[in-house]
Amino acid sequence: MSVPKRIPAIVVVLLFSFSLLLSFSLAQQGSAATPRPQPCSEPQQKQFDFWIGEWELTWPGNNPGETGHGTNTIRRIMDGCVVQENFSGGDSMHLRGTSVSVFDVSAGKWKQTWVDNEGGYLDFAGEFKNGQMILAREAMRPDGTNVIQRMVFKNISPNELDWSWEASKDGGKTWTVNWPIHYKRKS
């Protein structure tokens, strides 16, 4: 009668490891068949679609009769969840900036963060309502007084829109337009 030989420990460890890997692989294949929920599929996620594209910009120049010119390219990134802006003041001004915007489901608001080549950092929150996208923020002026700043996207059509940078020193009762820009879609 022969005595069974012992299986070396390394073989046992390798077989166990192989069975774990096989189980994990089969589990992964099963989950691949299960559809994942679509990120950023809320209806509000489409509210900024009017802004997507390549734009020629004009605004009043520093002197009467002058017109400033720039460009802005807006696109969706990160699986369509983020709206990214790339602004250039062209030859009219040195300002260059970028922003990212996302619809925050938990807050029910759009959130935007802007940064630029002047070291600027601005953060906004707002919503699309009555045919306008309004994003606002509270800020402190250099003299220590509070101000509300906002961007208003209005007069929106497929190939044009107006944008204005506005400020209120009285808590939003009255607004001053500091920089109006007209957008025209590049053809």
Image (cartoon, rainbow, N blue to C red):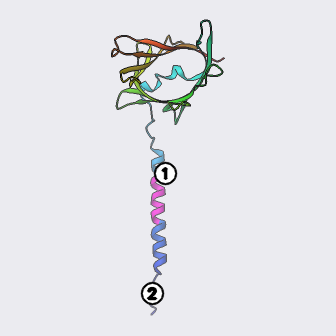
- Residue 163 x %, y %: 51, 15
Q: In which image quadrant can residue 110 be found?
A: top left
Judge by depth and name the residue closer to the eye, 4 or 120: 120
Q: How many marks?
A: 2
For label 1, the crowd category at 10 Å Cα-Cα, with few meaning under 14, some 14 to 19 and many 20 or more, is: few
Mark 2 or mark 1, which has the lower sequence index? Answer: 2
Question: Mark 1 belongs to which amino acid?
Answer: Gln
Residue 71 appears left or right of 147: right
Element assignment for label 1? helix
Q: Residue at x 48, y 62 (%)?
A: 21
Which kind of residue does numbered mark 2 sit on? Pro
x%, y% of residue 41? 44, 30
Element type at mark 2: loop
Circles 2, 1 touching at the beta carbon (< 8 Å): no
Which of 157/166 is in front? 166
Q: Is residue 22 above or below residue 43?
A: below
Are there few (<14), some (14-19), or many (20+) residues within 10 Å of tag 2?
Answer: few
Q: Is residue 65 magenta?
A: no
Q: Report the magenta stretch's main SS.
A: helix
Q: Nearer the viewer, mark 2 or mark 1?
A: 1
Q: Is 165 situated left or right of 137 in this image?
A: right
Mark 2, residue position: 4
Q: Which residues are magenta?
A: 19-29
Work out which quarter of the rendered image holds the N terminus and state it: bottom left
Q: Which residue is mark 1?
A: 29
For the residues marked 2 and 1, what is the alpha-carbon distance in whole angstroms?
39 Å
Q: Is residue 75 positioned above or below 28 on the image?
A: above
